Amino acid sequence: MKKNLLRVSVFALLVVAGLEAAYHFPVYAPGTLIFGVRAPRETAVVSPVPSKPTSGGPTGAAVMASAMASGNLAVSGPFTHDNLAIFLLHGEDRVKTGNVLTLDEALKQGKFRVYETQNVNELSIENLSDAEVFIQAGDIVKGGQQDRTLGYDTLVAAHSGRMRIAAFCVEPGRWGARGDENVRAFSSSESALVGNELKLAARRDKDQGKVWHNVRRTQTALGGNLQGGVEDHRSRSSLQLTLEHSAVREAAQGALDKLLPCLRPEHHDAIGFAVAINGKPASADVYLNADLFRRLWKRQLQASIIEALARKGEGTRTESVTSNEIASFLTRTQEGQAKSFPLANDLCEVQMEANGGVLFETRRSGQVLRQSFVAK
């Protein structure tokens, strides 16, 4: 399998007090492709988790005192299967941290609780462990009155006490017990949102109606491409049960078997990955360090595989996506105006939207915990 290695370096400096912000680039050896973007001229400040973003308030300098994240990234790949291409993103750890659990790990170990609140768009969480727990926007939690997806990234401190977190329903047809599941809490988080329209509906638009619409679109697309129903009789509207459906899992297994080993032990510096579907860049995620990415790799890859299944037949380009195109996608996505959404625990989410897509960047005290690039 052909693999290209593209050395990408982006250095960004945010200039405050109304001056123009710009990225600066070092000089590399001939043949190394460098790509960069201009940072936005100003940053709007908006309230956390609003129904629609609003501008105004303090300048970007007031809420983004630190420079924008800088560092080196290398892109390796593509690793391909059918209409899906995967690229690994290599670089230094952004955050040096001790033990961090994923949400699903913490739930299965009994070290974390997600509680039902009777409010469709808000849940309560509690970290009972001695470690921090990483929640990423798009995590689906199973159980309660109805399955939900969590609305933003957060790193929950050890022994946090109960906290609120924004959520969206991904199971519109249920409000009550499902079999013997606990209606007061959520048992697991094994899956993530599938498809860019669904991700944008929840994270950018924060629109419950659009989330429901795109849940149904995803189920319909999967059923059509797999030539059979993918809804579960226990709750036909549940996205989580559709992702668990035997027809979906069997259809995804070949790609999973082929692509999962692409993240090899020697890829100790892989901190994220990019996805292309039907010959076009679709998304990319960069995590706070290699250890966290490696533990999230299987579930995130599986979500990408299922997205590719849902989008099969949209018009596949014959030639493969290149590393250069992935670099261009990452560049273009950062060219829009930035908006900062303050969150709990000294976190903030910065969104940048351009013609190519949307970048969601979660920061804590100037450190970047996750970057999520979503093509439009």
Image: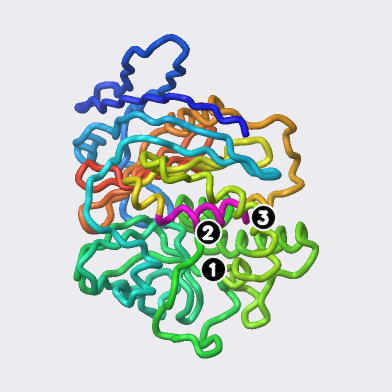
Image coordinates for residue 192, horizontal then vertical, percent: 50, 60
Q: Tell which circle, 2 or 3, labels the residue nearer the N-terminal end.
A: 2
Image coordinates for residue 369, horizontal then vertical, percent: 31, 47
Q: Is residue 153 left or right of residue 308?
A: left
Quarter of the N terminus within the rendering: top right
Q: Tell which circle, 1 or 2, labels the residue nearer the N-terminal end.
A: 1
Q: Is residue 295 left or right of residue 229?
A: left
- Disc 2 to disc 3, C-alpha distance: 21 Å
Q: Is residue 155 above or below residue 108?
A: above
- Residue positioned 60% across, 66% down in the render: 243
Q: Tell which circle, 1 or 3, labels the residue nearer the N-terminal end.
A: 1
Quarter of the C terminus within the rendering: top right
Image coordinates for residue 200, horizontal then vertical, percent: 51, 51
Could you say which disc has been placed on residue 170 in the image?
A: 1
Q: Residues within 10 Å of mark 2 (few under 14, many from 20)?
A: many
Q: Amino acid at mark 2?
A: Leu
Q: Which residues are magenta?
A: 295-306
